[in-house]
Amino acid sequence: MRIAVVNNFYPPRVGGSAHMAESLAKGYVERGHDVLVITAEYPGAPDEETVDGVRIVRLPAARLPKTTLAVNFDITFATRPSLPRRLRALLGDFRPDVIHQHGQFFDLTWATGLWARKHDVPVLLSVHTRLESPKKHYQAVFSTLDACLVAPILRRYKPVHVVMDALMEDYIKRKYRRGVSGTVDIPVGLDVEWTRGGDPDGVREKLGVGSAPMILSVGHVIPLRDRVTLVEAMPKVLEQVPDAKLVVVGGVYYDAFLSRAKELGVMDSIITTGAVPKAEVPDYLAAADVECHSLQGIGFGTACLESLAAGVPGVAAITEDHFGEIKIVDRMHLHLVPKNSPGPVAERLVEALKNPEESRKMARAGAAIVDEHFAMKAVIDKHLEVLESLAG
């Protein structure tokens, strides 16, 4: 097959959807398919290159100014007068059998979707992020964008949607039901071996934490993963484990947690690294005693699964049936807590830190779940099964 992979985000830009798109694109090539990646330009990356058999074309793009509405995220859009002509040339020459899009609210998704409709090419759309915010006025804006911009465009070409978990399934049904020609259940995938074998000593030396108990929190800090509940749990954690350190690894695009830490007097126990290269993440995972960042009931994403795959004990606000038939059982695979609940979070963090042997045993069971259901090989196979069906 000839598969066009479309995502405004693609490495060297970091982020869950960027790395997922890259892993799938490389996996498609390894299975013998031709792949063209269409993405937005990124500082320091060439306009066109071929990496591991994947042809990558980065189109000229404008970066949105960092605002609180965009949670200070580096979002780029490629819309300009030349875009339709460039896409006609690229896709017309490549002649894709199917298009795999990532992200429902990007202009490259919309533009390639409309091209696909005109040329009768089937489309698979992976929705990685829900347009939601805990702030009511921002949520009103996001709901309007979903209803007045995203949903009408999706209705014009009706892609098949990838459903990654129960929360995403509900979101797609509520927001885009008239723009969906079908859904397929495929969980987020990851390279499980990549997460393992990191160097803990180097990270601990760099952070200056020595042998102190380390609570790791991986992923960009945005309103939907604001770390406020985690910070509010820290006073009780420090009562039981006074030398514990909270290490936040990721870009800080929303800093309410730091203000809250100052109010609670726990700033001395918090370290922020900013965004780090993906290659360094396994080192942080190896150094951690427990990982915790998804506490607002909004899902269990790639960073959570990578931590679980690495055998790091975790605390998260999800239900046991979050992945449908794939059950994540409390205290068997993971510490499950109610959303936005500092007390239970503190109790489970202390439990993980004070009972390392039992915690690691639980984490090994969690890693086995990831190996069985979320390994990239199985996820690539499932995607290709769907893409071949669409192309046929």
Image (cartoon, rainbow, N blue to C red):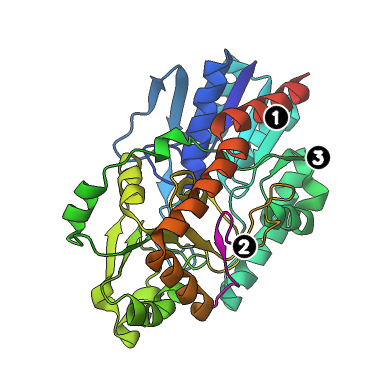
Secondary structure at numbered mark 2? loop
Q: CA distance from mark 2 to mark 3?
A: 26 Å
Q: Mark 2 or mark 1, which has the lower sequence index? A: 1
Q: Is residue 33 above or below residue 267?
A: above
> What amino acid type should be assigned to the residue bearing mark 2?
Ile
Q: CA distance from mark 2 to mark 1?
A: 37 Å
> What amino acid type should be assigned to the residue bearing mark 1?
Ala
| Residue drawn 47% across the image and 46% down it | 306
> What amino acid type should be assigned to the residue bearing mark 3?
Gly
Q: Residue furthest top?
A: 32
Q: Mark 3 or mark 1, which has the lower sequence index? A: 1
Where is residue 127? Give x, y as percent. 63, 47
**Magenta residues, start to end:** 331-341
Residue position marked by numbered label 1 in the rendering = 116
Residue position marked by numbered label 3 in the rendering = 182
| Residue drawn 52% across the image and 54% down it | 362
Between 355 and 186, the one nearer to me in the picture: 355
- Left or right: where does residue 84 sit relative to residue 184? left
